[in-house]
Amino acid sequence: MTSPYPATNYQEDNRGQFHFSTRAGWMNDVNAPLYYRGVYHLYYQHAPNSLVWDTMHWGHATSTDLVHWTQEPIALDPQIHPGDLWSGGGVVDLENVSGLKDGEDDPVLVYSGTNGVIVFYSLDGGNTFLTYADGKKVVTPGGTSRDPKVFWDPVSETWGMVVWSDEGGNGVDFYTSINLLDWTFASRYSADWLFECPNLIRMAIDDGYRWLLHGGSGKYVVGEWDGTTYHSDWTEPQKLNQTETFAGAGYYAGLTFENVPDGRIVSMAWQGENKGSIWTGNASFPVDLSLHHTDDGLRVFSTPIPELASLRESTQTWENLTVADSWQFAAGSTYELEATVDVSQVTSFTVKVGRDVMYQDRKLDGAKLEPVNGKIKLHLLIDRDQLDVFGNDGAVYQSYNVRPAELELVAEGRAVVEQLTIHQLGSIWR
């Protein structure tokens, strides 16, 4: 098939320099992110010949460090692979429970389809895919359904699948399997907020684990998975990303990478508000997720992956910087900011990037960010039109598409910036 991708140096206006965007065409939901033999695979909803949503393919990119990405040929093509190739998840079948192995590589299975789940499998490390059983639907939930995600439960030693459906209202159906191909209905979890792109994640806390269930908007609850049924005593969900999240917003349809070494939980999502002359949409910068006790109960913290440090080209640091009125700095369009600020003696303190207020008076764009011992911590990633904001070591996480400009700190009273570090970041595009 002729490549749909024109030549580019990835320097088009608005294109992020350390957020992944497809070489050309339309991109939306992150699909089946996984790690296999030293390579991270990122698949995504893709219309290669359009700048708007169109007939869906699965785009594909690879990385060895979650930072530098290489565009690969299309992974799922509607001219070759049957069904509506909408969002889904994937796994690496390291034990060959599927019996599909044929060669040195372990089978990589991905799941897609609307109103019924179709399995595609790769025998070359996740680069090309065959269709299982001529496209037979292995699961067909009631009502309208889509977005299957498969997970492993080490306690019951079974595979689980969570699929969104609207039968009786928003919610998800759970299925179980021992071979990744034959699935048995297990239970249903209903919730008004649980719409599209579900994900169930086993997360460490204290000396054990809890299970986090979230939907496309990033709304989540924490509970228990007993091998067939999900339980949570939460009456209201929280949010992984504390912004207004919907399809096409600055955050939607996040998924976590499967088979990652050391049990890391790495998440990426779709940022839909960015576009350029040959491409539309990008992925959020990868974050590590972790579960913490807070005064409000268990909460998910999100922090940018430490591999970001490989992009730092130069660094400026200020210590004990007193802001009594306004302090400005023209930092450029691709940089990282880390700051610890003592706000105990101020009436008001504001952090602005251009005309956009990021932090003001114990709120990070509306999300509560209480000082700890009189201090707040801010971590900002500015990448042309993409902005990621982290507060208090990841207690608050937000992502936007905005046009960056100079940084400004404004105080009424006396704010002491104990440390302010700005790293100029290089491009991921080789």
Image (cartoon, rainbow, N blue to C red):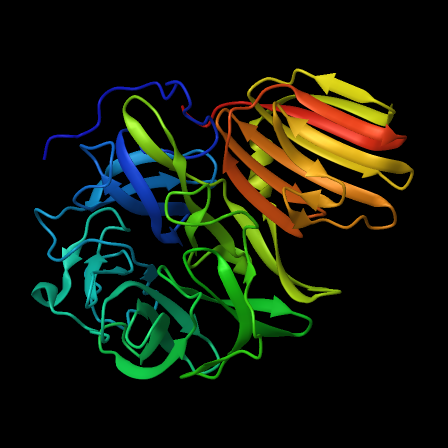
Using the rendered view, name the quadrant where residue 99 is placed. Answer: bottom left
Identify the residue shown where x is 64% and y is 43%.
390
Identify the residue shown where x is 31% and y is 79%.
178
| Foreground pick, 216 / 259 | 216
Please provide percent x and percent y for residue 265. Answer: 52, 57
| Foreground pick, 349 / 61 | 349
Please provide percent x and percent y for residue 40. Answer: 40, 46
Using the rendered view, name the quadrant where residue 282 is placed. Answer: top left
Identify the residue shown where x is 61% and y is 24%.
355
**Any part of residue 394 in sight:** no
Please provide percent x and percent y for residue 291. Answer: 62, 63
| Foreground pick, 402 / 58 | 402
Quadrant location of the N terminus?
A: top left
Using the rendered view, name the quadrant where residue 185 is placed. Answer: bottom left
Residue 78 vertical position relative to residue 352 in the rendered view, above or below: below
Number of marks in the rendered image = 0
Please provide percent x and percent y for residue 398. Answer: 57, 44
**Any part of residue 51 in sight:** yes
Q: Is residue 60 left or right of residue 212?
A: left
Quadrant location of the C terminus?
A: top left
Q: Is residue 369 left or right of residue 197?
A: right
Residue 345 vertical position relative to residue 133 in the rendered view, above or below: above
Q: Is residue 234 left or right of residue 168?
A: right
